[in-house]
């Protein structure tokens, strides 16, 4: 008897909570929702959290927006896409059915592409914060992005390698099954070979922790630079191996390495490490101080930022993305996603990472320089090297 | 000589990682020998040992945190067996294996929750993480120490199993589970003991492994775990020397393959080896003949 | 109730379900969360049932499901990406080598066939292995397949590590329901045929089954190939749901997830697998999401709630089910009209067990 009652009750509970969850779509009139579609777990969890942190900080700085003469509270709707293409769509459709006006994210291009159709069907525009793969915005009118693209970054890095180190031979290590890694590696290789260099490339499988052999190969090949556009977990391991084998060639990487995970790993080690990135700490004092305070004010925030208050470029980008979204809302004069989408084409905003405006073809940010930073292995901080563009 | 110094690092890395796989593989092979269970959670216990070390070393000195890691890992291994496997003793083998997968899922998710998913930096243990030069190849001292330490531990373990009472009970239980019970062997304490030994060795393995490869993520244990299992099968499941030799062979082959530039297939190779072994010689290199496996 | 009446009611219920879905689609916005989880639930129901056919009905413990789904997904994607889109999709490989497309339904079937062919080949050696050895060998094969599909040299065919996208997908929730429904119906028919009885005999006692004249190798191979066929189809459906295909999605974690669905539903129960896959998806991807967010009730900060907590709670629940409710939701019973009738009217337990195993 008990079991029967339990079964009936359980199914009733499921039904009720489903109805409730659907009904929750209705929201108060004076709130505008911004969706945050970022990974909090999985391979890109670390970066996703830092990006979210920047968005949250921006929200704490500017929690309201004036749309068409009326003050709205901005509410962040944060979902975890688990860095996974099969979990992403449900996270995305949670945002759409929650009635968000615009979506920010994601860290990691492939999850962004996987959710693209859901946003399109829901008529919600999305602003990519640091997804650098060209395919995110290609051939659609609802996905925008405020960062530079892989072809640009790959070329910048190749130029930097040949300008600064007079490199003739590069060792390129990418992660198997990771489109970010493969894409950036591809463009670097192309640009480097076009400049007359030689490239030795290797891939490593997912879940690999043993990078000893790769570093050995790079040494044996006599590479002048070691280029590794990979996620932070693998990066920390590569740095450690490179140091313990005494690799002399400088390590070079893209935006993912601009993280305190890398600084922690490189601290006290004897190696050279350069990254290209979106933002240079110290670029905007007010932002730096506020962001540090925000991170330090809360233990969860600090944990999400990797345990200290070094500002990741992705956080700065998240911050800019939030304000870009507010500009779009103001420009649209409405919280209607379709109007926001139209307004986004004309948005111009000067953020902490530079001027933001979108090209009229794909909705990509118009950017022509990237910052190059070097890790100071004694102090464990980034040092500004310079700006690098494409020749 | 030139060729030698070029390729020595691959060999060194292979031997070192092989030794670390061996320490994990022993846990698999002992548990499988007695319970006929692939303890999927074993790789995750190895990961948890790494995390404990990271958190312990931030609040206490090395000479306390290292023993603490060993003890805590043993306790976790013991608890996992008591909570997740013991209640299923009479259940079909599939249930207990599913339970092992469940434990693995739980440990990974807990680690994700606690660490927040960021790769944690393993502390440098003095002396063994120093950089040294061996015959012209630069590497960490741990690389050289691992194979010797592994062999010493294995000799100790073999002696334990051969000459002590609990060792005899273990051998009896792995020969025939039911009959050994009838002979008055306290089967539960024997099983607990195998988990304690297995977890202890996994903890030692984690100290060595993470000193060499210093990032700990929630899923870091999965691959070494699977490879160690393959090593155990390769050497003949239930056989401790077999597992150790299998682990060294896998570790070395893997690095040679990477050195040859076939990096895409370094993991695939391990599984291909497993399948070939299972089909050609299911008892492995040193396994005893048994009709149960095929 | 008579058998005929039962069938009529069952058919009517399925029709009613489809009509309800149709009506819901007309009322609710098409982007509602409900449809997303229903779509994925339907797809997972198919793969869970196909896994159950092996693990629950034939007693073959295989962990290769994700690998066969990968094969299905890639086959579908490669065969259906419009030719004019290939230049964009295969941007690093000059448009790839496949320069034709086939209709969606042909591609779906091809997805199943490719998975089945691979299963046949893999089955030749590995089906000789027993229980956990089979499990680990199939798991190994899935990993090998994944590595091969990510291989750069195969890029012109598989696009290497990059995404496949821009292929036809579905909008209506009815599509996955219909395809999964038809496939599951075929599996059920198979389970109720002489093959199904032979499978169960093998599961219960191989030696006895062989003594009764059942050709073990033949039947095991059939179960493996059929199961993989449907895993391939569900892989194709999953590809449609995700709108992108990337080999790294199909990890062993996916197989474990499906295995847990089967266990929760009850090993050896088709309807159990269906019900639990919907519950699994609905809870893990929708209802429990609030556990991931910091929550304030008034000014009270609810402790523990932060990113990742959902997964912890979920895995604890799974452990409880595995340990204490080993039968899962349905055990080996099936959800049927008579079952509900008996259940609600409280008919004796005896009758229920007597009809166990009938779909």
Image (cartoon, helix red, strand yellow):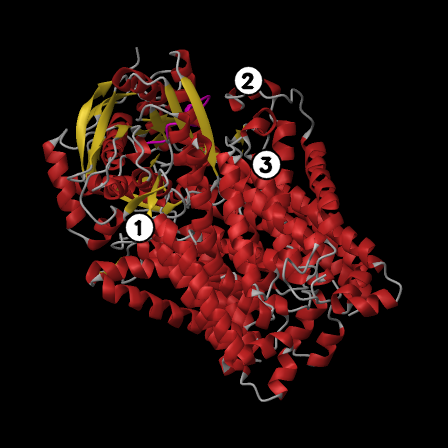
Of all residues shown, which one is farthest toward the right?
C213
Residue C123 location (% of width, % of height): 73, 49
Rounded to the nearest whole Å, what is the CA distance between mark 1 and mark 2?
40 Å
Q: Is residue B233 magenta?
A: no
Looking at the image, which residue is at 60% across and 68% down? B36
> Which mark's residue is nearer the viewer, 1 or 2?
1
State the residue position of label 2. Answer: C94
Q: Position of residue B41 (x, y in %)?
A: 48, 62
Mark 1 vs mark 3, CA separation in Å: 30 Å
Mark seen at residue B120: 1
Question: Is A145 left or right of C283, judged from the image as shown?
Answer: left
Q: Earlier in the sequence, mark 3 or mark 2?
A: 2
Q: Quadrant of the C terminus of chain A?
A: top left
Instruction: Give the spatial CA distance, label 3 vs label 2.
Output: 20 Å
Residue B256 or residue A349, whichever sits in front: B256
What mark, if any, has residue A210 been given in the picture? none
Question: Is B291 left or right of A385, judged from the image as shown?
Answer: right
Q: Give the quadrant of residue A319.
A: top left
Q: Is residue B160 shown above or below A202?
A: below
Residue beneath disc 3: C148
Q: Is residue A14 above or below residue A217?
A: below
User: Magenta stretch: residue A141 in it?
Assistant: yes
Magenta residues span A129-142
């Amino acid at each position: 008897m008990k079991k029967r009652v339990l079964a009936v009750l359980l199914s009733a509970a499921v039904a009720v909570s489903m109805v409730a969850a659907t009904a929750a779509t209705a929201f108060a009139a004076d709130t505008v929702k911004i969706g945050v579609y970022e990974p909090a777990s999985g391979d890109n969890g670390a970066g996703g959290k830092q990006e979210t942190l920047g968005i949250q900080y921006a929200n704490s700085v500017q929690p309201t927006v004036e749309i068409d003469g009326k003050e709205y509270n901005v509410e962040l709707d944060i979902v975890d896409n688990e860095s996974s293409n099969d979990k992403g769509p449900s996270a995305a459709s949670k945002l759409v059915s929650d009635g968000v006006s615009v979506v920010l994210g994601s860290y990691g291009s492939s999850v962004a592409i996987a959710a693209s159709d859901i946003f399109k069907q829901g008529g919600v525009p999305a602003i990519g914060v640091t997804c650098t793969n060209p395919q995110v915005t290609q051939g659609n009118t609802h996905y925008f992005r405020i960062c530079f693209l892989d072809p640009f970054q790959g070329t910048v890095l190749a130029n930097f390698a040949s300008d600064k180190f007079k490199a003739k031979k590069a060792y390129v290590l990418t992660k198997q099954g990771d489109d970010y890694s493969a894409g950036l590696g591809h463009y670097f290789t192309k640009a480097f070979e076009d400049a007359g260099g030689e490239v030795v490339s290797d891939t490593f499988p997912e879940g690999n922790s043993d990078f000893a052999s790769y570093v050995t190969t790079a040494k044996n090949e006599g590479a002048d630079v070691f280029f590794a556009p990979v996620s932070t977990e693998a990066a920390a391991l590569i740095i450690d191996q490179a140091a313990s084998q005494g690799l002399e060639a400088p390590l070079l990487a893209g935006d993912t390495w601009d993280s305190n995970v890398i600084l922690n790993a490189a601290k006290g080690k004897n190696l050279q490490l350069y990254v290209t990135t979106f933002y240079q700490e110290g670029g905007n004092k007010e932002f730096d101080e506020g962001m540090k305070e925000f991170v330090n004010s809360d233990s969860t925030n600090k944990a999400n930022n990797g345990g200290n208050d070094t500002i990741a470029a992705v956080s700065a980008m998240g911050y800019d993305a939030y304000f870009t979204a507010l500009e779009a809302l103001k420009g649209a004069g409405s919280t209607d996603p379709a109007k926001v989408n139209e307004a986004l084409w004309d948005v111009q905003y000067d953020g902490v990472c530079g001027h933001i405006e979108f090209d009229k073809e794909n909705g990509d940010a118009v950017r022509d320089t990237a910052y190059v930073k070097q890790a100071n292995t004694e102090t464990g901080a980034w040092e500004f090297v310079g700006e690098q563009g494409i020749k | 000589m030139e060729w030698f110094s070029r390729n020595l690092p691959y060999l060194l890395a292979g031997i070192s990682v092989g030794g670390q796989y061996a320490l994990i593989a022993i846990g698999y092979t002992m548990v499988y020998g007695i319970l006929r269970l692939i303890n999927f959670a074993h790789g995750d216990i190895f990961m948890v040992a790494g995390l404990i070390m990271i958190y312990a070393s931030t609040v206490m000195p090395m000479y306390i945190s290292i023993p603490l890691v060993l003890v805590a890992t043993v306790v976790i291994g013991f608890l996992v067996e008591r909570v997740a496997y013991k209640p299923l003793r009479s259940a079909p083998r599939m249930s207990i294996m599913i339970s092992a997968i469940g434990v693995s899922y739980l440990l990974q998710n807990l680690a994700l929750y606690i660490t927040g998913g960021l790769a944690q930096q393993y502390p440098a243990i003095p002396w063994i993480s120093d950089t040294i030069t061996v015959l012209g190849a630069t590497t960490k001292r741990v690389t050289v120490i691992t194979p010797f330490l592994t062999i010493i531990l294995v000799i100790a373990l073999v002696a334990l199993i051969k000459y002590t009472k609990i060792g005899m009970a273990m051998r009896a239980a792995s020969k025939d589970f039911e009959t050994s019970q009838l002979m008055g062997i306290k089967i539960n304490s024997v099983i607990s003991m195998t988990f304690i030994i297995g977890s202890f060795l996994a903890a030692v393995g984690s100290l060595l492994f993470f000193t060499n490869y210093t990032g700990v993520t929630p899923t870091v244990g999965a691959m070494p775990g699977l490879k160690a299992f393959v090593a155990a099968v390769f050497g003949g499941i239930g056989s401790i020397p077999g597992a150790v030799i299998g682990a060294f062979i896998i570790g070395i082959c893997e690095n040679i393959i990477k050195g040859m530039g076939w990096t895409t297939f370094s993991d695939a190779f391990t599984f291909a080896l497993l399948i070939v072994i299972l089909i050609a010689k299911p008892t492995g290199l040193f396994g005893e003949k048994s009709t149960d496996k095929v | 109730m008579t058998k005929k009446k039962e069938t009529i009611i069952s058919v009517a219920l399925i029709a009613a379900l489809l009509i309800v879905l149709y009506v819901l689609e007309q009322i609710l916005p098409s982007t509602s969360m409900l449809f997303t989880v229903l779509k994925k639930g339907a797809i997972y129901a198919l793969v869970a049932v196909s896994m159950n056919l092996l693990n629950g009905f034939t007693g073959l413990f295989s962990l290769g499901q994700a690998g066969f789904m990968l094969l299905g997904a890639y086959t579908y994607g490669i065969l259906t990406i419009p030719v004019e889109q290939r230049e964009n999709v295969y941007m690093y490989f000059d448009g790839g080598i496949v320069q034709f497309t086939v209709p969606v339904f042909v591609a779906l079937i091809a997805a199943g066939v490719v998975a089945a062919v691979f299963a046949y080949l893999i089955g030749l050696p590995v089906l000789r292995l027993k229980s956990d050895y089979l499990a680990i060998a199939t798991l190994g094969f899935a990993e090998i397949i994944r590595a091969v599909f990510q291989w750069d040299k195969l890029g012109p065919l598989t696009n290497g590590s990059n995404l496949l996208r821009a292929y036809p997908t579905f909008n209506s929730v009815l599509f996955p329901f219909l395809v999964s429904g038809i496939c599951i119906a075929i599996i059920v028919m198979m389970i109720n045929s002489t093959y199904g009885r032979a499978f169960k005999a093998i599961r219960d006692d191989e030696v006895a089954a062989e003594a009764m004249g059942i050709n073990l190798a033949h039947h095991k191979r059939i179960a493996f190939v059929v199961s993989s066929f449907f895993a391939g189809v569900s892989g194709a459906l999953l590809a449609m749901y995700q709108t992108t295909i990337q080999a790294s999605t199909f990890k062993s974690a996916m197989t474990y997830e499906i295995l847990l669905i089967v266990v929760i539903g009850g090993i050896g129960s088709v309807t159990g697998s269906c019900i639990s896959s919907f519950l699994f998806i609905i809870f893990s991807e929708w209802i429990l999401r609030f556990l991931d967010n910091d929550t304030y009730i008034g000014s009270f900060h609810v402790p523990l709630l932060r990113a990742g907590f959902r997964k912890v709670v979920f895995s604890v629940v799974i452990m409880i089910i595995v340990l204490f409710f080993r039968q899962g939701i349905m055990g080996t019973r099936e959800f049927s009209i008579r079952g509900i009738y008996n259940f609600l009217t409280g008919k004796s337990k005896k009758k229920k067990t007597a009809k166990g195993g009938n779909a």
